[in-house]
Every structure is written in C-alpha cells, then in structure tokens.
Amino acid sequence: MDKTNRNNPVEFTVRGIVLGVLITLVFTAAQVYLGLKVGLTFATSIPAAVISMALLSAFKDATIQENNIVQTIASAAGTLASVIFVLPGLLMIGWWSKIPFWPTFGACAVGGVLGVMYTMPLRRALVSQSDLPYPEGVAAAEVLKVGTATRSGAQEGKAGLWAVIWGSVASALFAFLAAAKLIAAEVAAFVRVGNGATGIGASSSLALVGAGHLMGITVGIAMLVGLVIAWGVLVPLLTNWAGMPAGAEVGAFATKIWRTDVRMIGAGTIGAAAIVTLATLVKPVVGGLKSALEASKRARHGGAEVPREDQDLPLFVVGLVTLVSMVPAGWLLASFLEGGPLGSISTPLVAVGIGYVLIAGLLAAAVCGYMAGLIGSSNSPVSGLAILTILGAATTVGMVGRHVMGPDTANALIAYALFVTTVVLAVAVIGNDNLQDLKTGQLVGATPWKQQVALIIGVFAGSCVVPQVLELLNHANGFAGAPNVNAISDQPLAAPQATLISTLAKGVVGGDLQWHLIGYGALIGLGLVAIDFLLKTVSNKKYSLPPLGVGLAIYLPSAVTAPVVVGAVAGYFFEKAMHGKKHGEAASRLGVLIMSGFIVGESLFNVALAGLIVLTNKGEPLAIANNLSEAAGMLIAIAVGAAVVVGLYRWSANSARAIEA
C-alpha cells in the first residue's frame, strides 16, 4: 500500500497491536514501581513512539498512523498505573493482606473502558474545535512527524531508541550498585537547630533525576520551595516546640516530626491547591461539554459523509458499552462486600457505588480530559482529584452505613470507599489520556475510532500487569504503614499517595482526622495560589509557582523530591546550552529519551529485584560485604551519578550534531 494514501493508510495492524501491548506491559511494570516509590508517574507516549518508529522502520509499508496506534496503546501504561495511588491503602488498613488479581484487574479494566467512553463525545469540542494547547499531545505528534518524514528523522529515530537503551542500562547499573551496597542508597545529612533538628536526604536514584528533567524547571523550583518550607521552616519550628528527647538520634527525631505533623500540613496544602485548581476549570469544562453536544447534533443532522479523520465510535455503541460496563462494575462491588460485616446493607452500598462511578467518573473524566489539553497529562493534578474523590466516596458511603457503625463496619466502609475511588480514578486518568492521544492523532491524520479501540486494548494489557506487579512488590518489600506480615525485605516502599488517601478515608469515616494540621496546610496552599497568581500576572504568564508542586514537596519525603529538583535544574542548564544551536532541538529530544530510559531501567531493575527477593527469601540478595564508610558511599554515589548524567547529556549533544551534519 502507498504510504501517502491518506484515505486508507496502514494504521491498525497485528504487528502494531502486538508491539503496543509489549511496550505497555514493560512500561506499566516500571510505572507501578515508580508510583509506589515516589508517588509520581511519567508520560510514556514519546518513548513508545520512538521505540515503535525504530522497530517498524524495518517494514516498507509502516506509516505514521501505525506508529501512532502503537503509542496510543502504550500510553495506557503511563496513566492506568495511577490506580496504585489508592490500592495499597487497602493493605494499609488491613483489609487485604495480598493483592487479589481479579478485583484489581476488574477495577482497572472497567474504569479504563469507561474513561474512553466518557471522553469520546468530548473529542470535537475539546480537540478538533478547541484552541487548547495539549503540550504533550503536540510533542508526541512532532516526534512522530520528525521520525517518519525525513532521512535525518529516521536517523534520529534510531538514535532515540539507543537513547532509551543507554538511559535504561545506565540507571539499572546504578540501581544495582545501590542494591549491592557499593554506593549509598541515600545521601543524607541532619543537624541540630537549637533544641530541635532538621536535615535533608536524597535518594541515589537516576529515575528521580530523569523525572525532574521531564517535569521541567517550573515544577522543579516549586518543589525546591516545598523542600525549604518543609525542612527549612516547619521541621525546625516543630522539633523545637516538641523538644528533642534525651538520647534521641537527630535524623530519626526530625524524620518522626516530619512524618507525623509536617506531612499532614502538606496534605492540606495539596488539598487546597487542588480544589482551587479544579474550581478554575468548572466554567471551561461546562462550556466544552455544551459545545460537544452542539457539535454532535450538527454532525448528526448535517447529512454529509463524515471524513475518516473525524469518525468516532458510534454514540449508540458508547452508550451500550457504558451500560454493559455497569454489570461487571456491580458484580465487582458486590463481591468486594460479600461475606463481610456490611452484608446487611450491601444492596444500597452497591447502588450508591455504581451511581458514584457513573456520575463522579463522568465529571472526573471531563475535568481530567480538559486538564490534558490545558497543561498536559503529566502535569494534571490527579492526586488532587483523588483527594476529592475519596472525600466524596467516604462521605457518601459513610452516610449509607452510619446506622451500622462499629469498629469492624467502619474499617469495611473505609475499604469500600477506597475500592470505589480506585474505579473512579481509573476512569479519570484514562479520560485524561484519551483526549491527549486524540490530539496527537488529529495532527498526524489518524482515525479517531481506531485510536479509541487501541486505547481500550492498552487498558486491558495494563490491567493484567498492575495486580501482579503490585503483589510482587507487596510480598518482597511491603508498604509503609501496612502490617506487611508477608513482606521479606525490611525496606517497605513509601506509597505516599496511597498513605494520604487512606489516611483521609479513615479520618472522614472515623471522625479523627487531624483537621488543625490540614487547616494550616490549606492556609499555606491558599497563600501559594495567591503568589502563583501574582507571578503570572506580573510576568505575563512567563513565570509561575505551581502550588500543587510545592504541596507535593512538603508531603513527599525529601529523599524523593531532592533528586527531582536536581534533575529539573540539570535539564534546564542542558536545554539552555542547546538553545539556538542547529542541532539543539534534536539534542533536547534525545535528552528527554535518555531521561525516560533512566526511569524505565531503574524501575524494571527494582521489579526484577523484588522477584529475586521473593525467590531467595532474602531481604538484600545482591548485597556485597565491604568496608566502605557511610560518607565514602555517599561521595561515590554523587560522583558516579554526576558522571553518568553529564556523560549521557554529552552523548545526546554529539549524536544530535552527527544527525544534523
């Protein structure tokens, strides 16, 4: 077939589907680990597109549309893994001791399918007829165009594949050195401040450096501000007020105060910032929904044949799939309650749960879809949406079960609220991803309905991986705050978002939330919103200070946020050095792929390490005995990490120069 035949290009192929599914399986495993370690995930569209172009270039009839289908399937990995922001909460409250496959698969799959169905009718209003920027969707389209249009583009595609490979290998080897105890796993220093203490820690993680580069300098500066607020102001103040007990270790005392008090203040900051952010989106989302309905009516009554590039799944199919999806959704919710202390009220709880998934899911998908257009999928405040969703679910479920309250029923209601929230979150994040993918498709001449089917395939592929990787990590490491009775290692994963969500659910249902700390955090959040508004106004939107980024840095451990800040600053200076040069844009794209490789390589290594921990029944199976002091291990970690980052930035610049020569 002629590649240039725009009326019927090669698009939906068996090889493309197989490649997309394989990339999805690998990237989902990486995303699950990263999300559990640091509470963040990364966009997989661009690395998936680069891998696809490099591999499919072996086929003469491969097209840009076929590569787009591959990245559409694989993009599900970047978003569906966000359900791990909630699911470990069921382990933390003691409801589950293991991650069951079918309920987890079902929650991901049903939520993901509904996410596609809910946002499909919004395509014309929010994509085709909208001036929303869709930064990540446009970036993915540009990568596809560059990689398939020219000889130098094909060269860059191959260099891009090597960038992902080199980044993955480097970060996996660096993670191996930490697992083998040949470098320090964390670089940290704590000091006394008056009668209190403070300090800073940074995980030896190239994945986090890569995440910082991808987030950019604006989010990096916001996280730096959050670090200063948390560890430069709040921890010293609160430790001085509490007073350090005699004989207490400085680092342990500072960390304890951060974990019990400062973290809840951070939760309040995130909550306030998320609510304000979402409130500003109400008007444009409502307007978008109205114009979507109007566009649908015009298309229905126009009578003319709809062009291939504008063909969605038929509305009756969308409605039918949505209704049919309620059957497995109801079965999932009913089986979750079966045999538990809420059996007597299971019918009203299932009815409320289905209603919540339908209504809250629709609203969440619309809001998240709009945010993908406004600020991109990676920057969308999914954690804020999860907070609002769990507060709504816990309140609604609590009202139904208030007359049967007791210790067992309260825990069961919390668990049910968390499970319902998991489904709604899957709806929201896939809705977010669907519209972003459709924007990419619009720019490369794709067929919308084929993309929508492709994303559903990606949803099912990702849904198969999430429960298995979650259970592997649960058995190997466990999660902070969970009983971890079956965990082998004594180093549990932080799962920071799940900790926050489960804490809020317990507080709402049990009535013992630390509202005063959350209130202080909310005041900080509102102050940050005001500062962000002033910055944008004074600089004509050139500068900003995202309040959610600041809140996350207060809430997340400094071991997570400090390397992210380092990555953001390093990325800024690399981009600045490349700016204005002939090969600068190609170098920047290769830099992005190196950093994506950092995330994939380290995450997959640690998933494999979890498997080794389970197989050997040893908490540290790769540890090598040595006489390195703690300080020496830290210095070696800094030196090796810096050498790898600088070396691969130089490789990106040199490769780009060779391509453009």
Image (tube, rainbow, N blue to C red):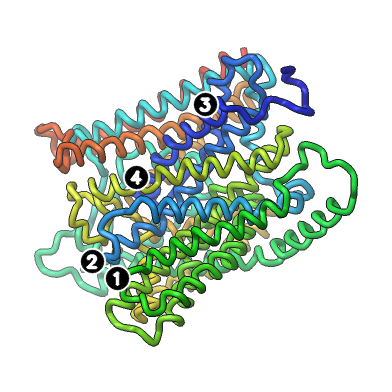
Q: Sequence-wise, which precedes: disc 1 or disc 4?
A: 1
Which of pointers 2 and 1 lies earlier in the amino acid sequence?
2
Given residues 154 and 299, the one toward you in this image is: 299
Circle 3: residue type = Ile
Alpha-carbon span between mark 2 and mark 4: 43 Å
Could you tell me how far apart the alpha carbons at marks 1 and 4 are, in whole angstroms? 41 Å
Tell me if residue 497 comes above or below residue 377 in the rendering. below
Q: CA distance from mark 3 to mark 1?
A: 49 Å
> Is residue 431 shown left or right of residue 523?
right
Residue 467 in sight: yes
Q: Which residue is mark 2?
A: 196
Q: Amino acid at mark 1?
A: Leu
- In front here: 504 or 216? 504
- Mark 2 → mark 3, Cα distance in angstroms: 51 Å
Residue 2: image location, x then y, percent: 74, 17
Q: Amino acid at mark 4?
A: Gln
Residue underneath mark 4: 468
Question: Disc 4 on helix, strand or loop?
Answer: helix
Q: Which residue is mark 1?
A: 238
If the image is split into quadrants, where does the N terminus sit?
A: top right
